[in-house]
Amino acid sequence: MRMWVPWAGLPPRLTLSALTGPGHFCTLRSGAARRKDVPAGYRRDLSEFQPKLLPRTGFGKSSRVCKPTSEPKRYITNPRVAETLVRILRRKRKAGQLFVECNPGPGFLTRALLESGAKVIACESDKAFIPQLEDLGRKLGGKLKVVHCDFFKLDPRGHGALKPPIMTAETLFQNLGIGANPWSKGAAFKVVGILPTKSERNTLWKILHDLYSCTSIYEYGRVELNLFVTEKECRKIMANPQNPSLYQALSVLCQLACGIRVLHTEPCSSFKTNIQDGQLEKTKHRESEQNLCFIQLSPHRNLFSRTLTPFNYDVFFHMLKQCFVKRNAMLIDHLHSLSPVDTWHIMNQMKKNPSMKIIDMYPEDFQRLFEIIECSRDGACRWLYDDFMEDVLM
């Protein structure tokens, strides 16, 4: 049961999500219109710029059919690293604190967490490691529960077969006896793991879609994620206009949704990679020279408001993607392609220089832009989309 409750008085919104299917979104709502439907008075100043609309949810280059893959994963096999992480995660030493560990593999971090007094749910996707983890649970007093599933693929947004078998967060947590908490109270557990090696970006996008829509694990409250990501991806997540080459829509969404902390940095040489059937090998030399950053993503309590809600978040995502298609263009030029609302009215409300570029806007500026357009009384149409988008989606 979803614990987020919309504010009373929100206008009813039309959505085509039932028609577009998983992995798609559509901005056809009560506040959106095609260009040809916009009154002539609004159309006069529309620029010729045609943004590249992205009809899919934005998980990188995902195809419509998800093919089974044996994606390489990194595992903690160094006791020193495991002990370091436990010291970071268990600073308050809360008795019986619950952690959901993603793909623990041989269980080095699992053992360290259990020995510190924590309870652990191990979500392991490789069957070869499950007997070893179950044996560890028996030896350490039954504080460990082992589930055969890939935590990062809960509630998939695509079609087709996935291995191991598809599982939903609802099924997983109901079977484990974990209930949902109100958004204001956080969650009853924390997640710890390493993002998949080759689908790191896609996984981050899925996490953000689940977070902003309050679905999957975020139906259970403000779940804190403690994840190893590559240093390159970490820098992108935390980038702003002071790091223009790294700054992107993903940066804006992460920073608006979560408090982000880098808890620890570890060289890739401290990890091992699976080959198959539970066999591990050392990280290749080129990769071993890189670092992984252990980051904490804590969803903000005040993420949602009367303006940005789990019911219109997709419009916000779409706006950001549109803007970053031409990141060096001026904001006022983008406004002609985003909304029929008077551009000078928007700029006056923003209190920004008309020549301001997209790349110079901070995350809070994008949120303010979205709020101004959403709250506009300038007619029923607030957002524009191109005709071909409907053709693709339908």
Image (cartoon, rainbow, N blue to C red):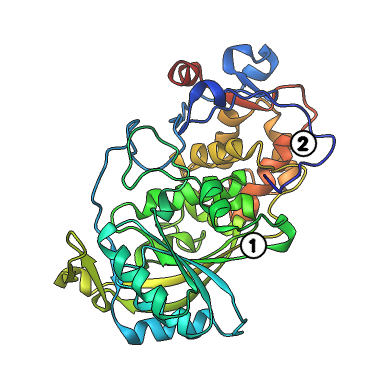
Q: Secondary structure at mark 1?
A: loop
Residue nearest the observer in this picture, 88 or 116: 116
Q: Is residue 357 visible?
A: no
Q: Secondary structure at mark 2?
A: loop
Q: Which mark is residue 195?
A: none
Q: CA gap, disc 1 to disc 2?
A: 31 Å
Reply above or below: 139 against 132: below
**Residue contact between numbered discs 1 and 2, judged by CB atoms under 8 Å:** no
Residue type beneath disc 1: Ala
Residue at which label 1 appears: 187
How many C-alpha atoms fall within 10 Å of the one at disc 1: few (<14), some, or many (≥20)? many
Query: In screen coordinates, is 257 left or right of 205?
Result: right
Residue at which label 2 appears: 375
Reply above or below: 37 against 170: above
Residue nearest the observer in this picture, 372 or 285: 285
Q: Is residue 146 visible?
A: yes
